Image (cartoon, rainbow, N blue to C red):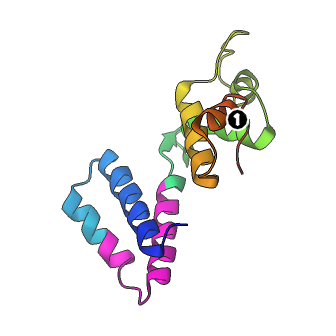
Amino acid sequence: MKSCEELLEVERQKYIAAETKKGFKEAAILTAWKESVMKADTVEHKLSNAKKLTKDIKESRPRVTRNNGSGINEAVSEDRIQRAMRLHKMSFREATIFCGDKDPGASAKTPAAFTESLVTAWKEYAPWISDSDAKKLAERGISPE
C-alpha cells in the first residue's frame, strides 16, 4: 500500500504530464498545482484536492463546432468509442458503429492504445495482477470498473 505522500506525487506527475501535453510551461503548471493543491492543511486533504484536479483534466473535452454555427463540448471519437466499449460491454467494431463512425470491418482489432489504457487501469486497480493477465483481460475488453 502506498503512502499518501507517494500517491500525492503520482497525482502530481499525472497532472504535469497532462498539462505539458496541452503546451503549458512547467513553471505555470507548478504554480497552478501549488495554488489548488498545496493550500490544504493535511496530506489527506492535499491528496483529495489533487485527485479532483486530475479528474477535471480527464473530463475536459474539446469544443466541436457544428455546420449551423452552434458548438458543443464533446469527447474525441476514440474516447467515445472506448467509453461505449466499457459501458455497454461491446466489441471495438460494435462500439465504432454505435458511435456513428464508419464500419471498420469484420477483421478489425482493438487499437493498441485502447488495450494499453485498459492494462494500465488493471494495474492501478489490482497492483498484484501479472502483466500477462492484465493484457489478456484488456484484449477481451474487460474493464476493472
Quarter assignment of residue 21: top left
Q: Secondary structure at mark 1?
A: helix
Residue 81: tell me if it is visible.
Answer: no
Quarter assignment of residue 117: top right
In front here: 24 or 43? 43
Instruction: Give the x, y percent position of residue 88.
Output: 80, 39
Residue at x 35% of width, y 80% of height: 38
Residue at x 36% of width, y 58% of height: 13
The number of callouts visible is: 1
Disc 1 crowd rating (10 Å Cα; few below 14, some 14-19, many 20+) is some
In front here: 12 or 67? 12
| Residue 136 sits inside the magenta stretch | no
Instruction: Please determine whether, in this image, residue 103 is positioned above or below residue 35.
Output: above
Apparent side of residue 85 relative to residue 46 in the rendered image (left or right): right
Residue at x 39% of width, y 76% of height: 37
Instruction: Give the x, y percent position of residue 4.
Output: 47, 74
The segment highlighted magenta reads 33-57
Residue at x 70% of width, y 43% of height: 143
Apparent side of residue 144 relative to residue 21 in the rendered image (left or right): right
Instruction: Please determine whether, in this image, residue 98 is positioned above or below residue 63.
Output: above
Instruction: Give the x, y percent position of residue 102.
Output: 65, 17
Disc 1 residue type (three-letter): Leu
Residue picked out by circle 1: 137
Quarter assignment of residue 111: top right
Query: Residue lying farthest bottom?
Result: 41
Apparent side of residue 120 relative to residue 53 in the rendered image (left or right): right
In front here: 34 or 104? 34
- The quadrant of the picture occupied by the N terminus is bottom right
Main secondary structure along the magenta-highlighted residues: helix
Instruction: Please determine whether, in this image, residue 115 is positioned above or below residue 48.
Output: above
Apparent side of residue 141 relative to residue 74 in the rendered image (left or right): right
